[in-house]
Image (cartoon, rainbow, N blue to C red):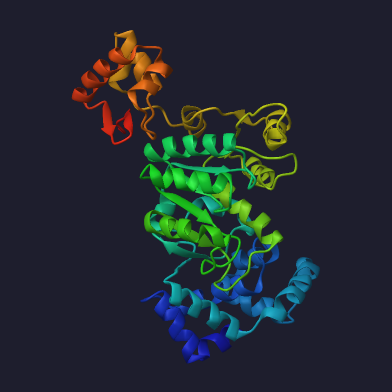
Amino acid sequence: MIDALMNDREIRRAAESARPGDEPVQTLARAAWSVIAEPGDGVAGALIAQLGAAEALRFGLSDESFGLAEKAVQDGRRRWMPRAHPRAVRDALRGAAEVGAQVLLPGDADWPSAVDDLGDHAPTMLWVRGEASHLAATSRVAIVGARAATAYGDSVAAELAGDLAAGGTMVVSGGAYGIDGSAHRASLGAGGATVAFLAGGVDRAYPAGHQQLFERIRSSGAVLSELPCGAAPTKFRFLARNRLIAALGAATVVVEAGWRSGSLNTAGHASSLGRPLGAVPGPVTSAASAGCHRLMREYDAVCVTNAAEVREMLGIDAAPTADTDRTDPEQVRLLDALSTRTAHPPVELARLSGLSVERTRALLGTLSLEGTVKQEENGWRRART
């Protein structure tokens, strides 16, 4: 197949256009593997690791013997052959060009090396829309949870993601309804970067109701997939996609999950990779939090209640601030009541801090002169540092 791809001028030009200046053989070989093999195919991954993508493609679609792994290779060939059509590779590259998707290969400057921890189950390539440089962020956290999230879950996910993003941590999630969407939106609202892994091609907005959200993510982050353009999301691909979310995140936090939630699959991948795992507690009567409680009980997940505890999981020390040296207890109480993400009116801040409204207004004026707080149209919030 690799020879057919290289000898087809149209397909070769498409590969050269996707990666100008590069020898197209590697692009074509890895694009072909992304077409013929399902995500996480360990047999394909082992062949590529041993032979290189192009030679593995030649061998994988031949009838040559492979010694001790013969049965696994034969089973792989039966999976790959029905999809081994040069036209499918051409269509994938064309689809990427039409939506402006970037082709990212292992070894590229922007390749997220964290996914290499998946070994033979690592992606053969990534199709990216947005700014791929965000994938190299040093501080990354995966925030996942239920699609049918409660108001409590959405609120906690937004608070965690917003505070983390405001502090420079990139938020990784899956672009789904519920907790994923809340985490992405809060990250964007805080001016931070966020990345969404899809279970289908990056030319498809799934779920369709998040079309505008994906557009916003692409403008200040990235939407990516290991599947070629045109690929449809399936149940298996959602589960396979979860391993990439867990691998890219330096830690994974499950905000809300039912007893059998798919988010537990992401948590399992994080645990097997040795990534720190956190879970947000909920009411013991809530079925929506049963999965989180299960993670804390059975998987030794860390109980997470705020962004500072997530930073602790990531090994990030809180930046020293002038608050450490404050001696005025009323200022400390007011600063504790202020959020870096959401502005609150003085009346609400007075209620949260236990101060009078008059005293709250006076302290806000003092802290504003220091640059510690900022006034916005709907209230006051702490200035981001």
Residue 87: give x, y in percent of width and height: 58, 86
* Along the line of sight, the residue nearer the viewer: 150 or 54: 150
Q: Nearer the viewer, residue 207 or 83?
A: 207
Place of residue 64 in the rendered image (x, y in percent of width and height, measured from the top left): 73, 80
Image spot of residue 224 (x, y percent): 50, 61
Left or right of 53? Residue 297 is: right
Q: Is residue 329 above or below residue 75?
A: above
Q: Is residue 56 above or below residue 222?
A: below
Q: Position of residue 105 (x, y in %)?
A: 48, 65
Using the rendered image of the protein, determine whether residue 52 is visible from the camera's viewpoint.
Answer: yes
In the rendered image, the vertical position of residue 326 relative to residue 90, given as above or below: above
Q: Residue furthest right?
A: 71
Q: Is residue 277 visible?
A: no
385 relative position to 55: left or right: left
What's the residue at 68%, 37% (across, down)? 288
Residue extending furthest left?
369
- Residue 219 or residue 273, whichever sits in front: 219
Which quadrant does the C terminus fall into? top left
Instruction: Please give left or right for residue 183 compared with residue 49 in the image.
Output: left
Count all numbered tags in the image, as a single digit. Answer: 0
Rendered view: 35 above or below 219: below
Residue 133 figure quarter: bottom left
**Which residue is painted at 59% across and 70% down in the image?**
34
The quadrant of the picture occupied by the N terminus is bottom right
Q: Nearer the viewer, residue 83 or 62?
A: 83
